[in-house]
Image (spheres, rainbow, N blue to C red):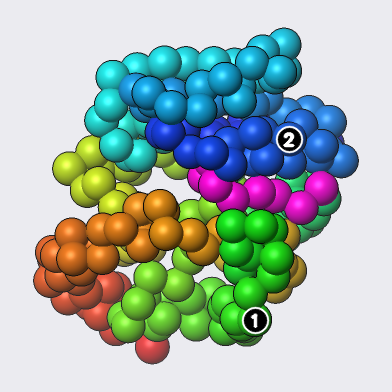
Amino acid sequence: MNPKVSIIIPFYNCPYVDQAIESAINQTYSNIEIIVVDDGSTKFKEKLVPFQEEIVYIRKENGGTATALNEGIRLATGEYIAWLSADDYFLPDKVAKQISFMIKEKVEASFTNYNYIDEANQPIDHWAQPVFSNNEDVYRAFLNYNAINGCTVMIKKEIFEQAGYFNPNLRYTQDYEMWVRLLIKGYKIYYLDEELTKFRIHKESGTYKHQLAMQQEISIIESEYRPLLKEYITRNLQ
């Protein structure tokens, strides 16, 4: 089995986008398409030029990461979707290992561990994720925090068509809302304990620059979804 995987890279004024694209191109898994969604960038567009023949390029008005992801998902021709932020990168065997895991375990959505790097691609000494021994651990983790890094996720495209797309009203936490929404709808998201993505810490990242707005969005998500998640766990996982 060799299903197509669409790697979607939302891009907005990011100086690292060429490294993200190169990591997608250099995947050992061959059946991929790379979709770069330019969310109204005004800087660093020249970094896309060397890859014109190897990517699908989409430009749109600025609307935030959720809108860029949604545009890429709608236009993707792959059976599976992977999201890669423009400032992060995949290890070469990321797609191959994850798709193999999903096919072997017969799962429709999965996420993995990851490592932190700095602006110069140097490792930062952080232990990124706890090890989830089973799917119930994933559910319970979400009672306390967002347990999934969006750029480690691989998911069947049909799930978005069934459960809905990313919420465009959430500029910084659209992934958190998506994963909780899927869980309470009964979609299982399985964990592969391998570090297959490099997550960049830098002062221009949205995570760094918009902490207050992120916390406000997190409060909205948790007030709406945590009671529903607790109810789901009580009803299905006890």
State the residue lying farthest toward the right. 28
Task: Please state which of residues 85 and 140 is positioned toward the viewer in this rendering.
Answer: 85
The answer to whether 176 appears left or right of 14 in the picture is left
- Which amino acid, by three-letter code, is at mark 2? Glu
Q: Residue at x 36, y 60 (%)?
A: 207
- Give residue 22's mark: 2
Quadrant in which the C terminus is drawn: bottom left
What separation in Å lies between label 1 and label 2 (alpha carbons)? 24 Å
Quadrant in which the N terminus is drawn: top right
Structural crowding at the residue carrying mark 1, measured as other residues with C-alpha within 10 Å and reported as few (<14), some (14–19) or many (≥20)? few
| Quadrant assignment, res 187 | bottom left
Q: Position of residue 204 (x, y in %)?
A: 40, 52
| Quadrant assignment, res 23 | top right
Structural crowding at the residue carrying mark 2, measured as other residues with C-alpha within 10 Å and reported as few (<14), some (14–19) or many (≥20)? some
- Give residue 125's mark: 1
The answer to whether 167 appears left or right of 136 in the picture is left
Q: Residue at x 41, y 53 (%)?
A: 205
> What secondary structure is found at the residue carrying circle 1?
loop
Q: Residue at x 71, y 18 (%)?
A: 50
| Quadrant assignment, res 78 | top right
Q: Residue at x 58, y 77 (%)?
A: 128
Q: Are marks 1 and 2 in contact (CB under 8 Å)?
A: no
Q: Position of residue 11 (x, y in %)?
A: 46, 33
Q: Position of residue 80 (x, y in %)?
A: 61, 37
Segment tinted magenta in the rendering: 85-92
* Residue 91 belongs to the span the image colors magenta: yes
> What secondary structure is found at the residue carrying circle 2?
helix
- Which amino acid, by three-letter code, is at mark 1? Asp
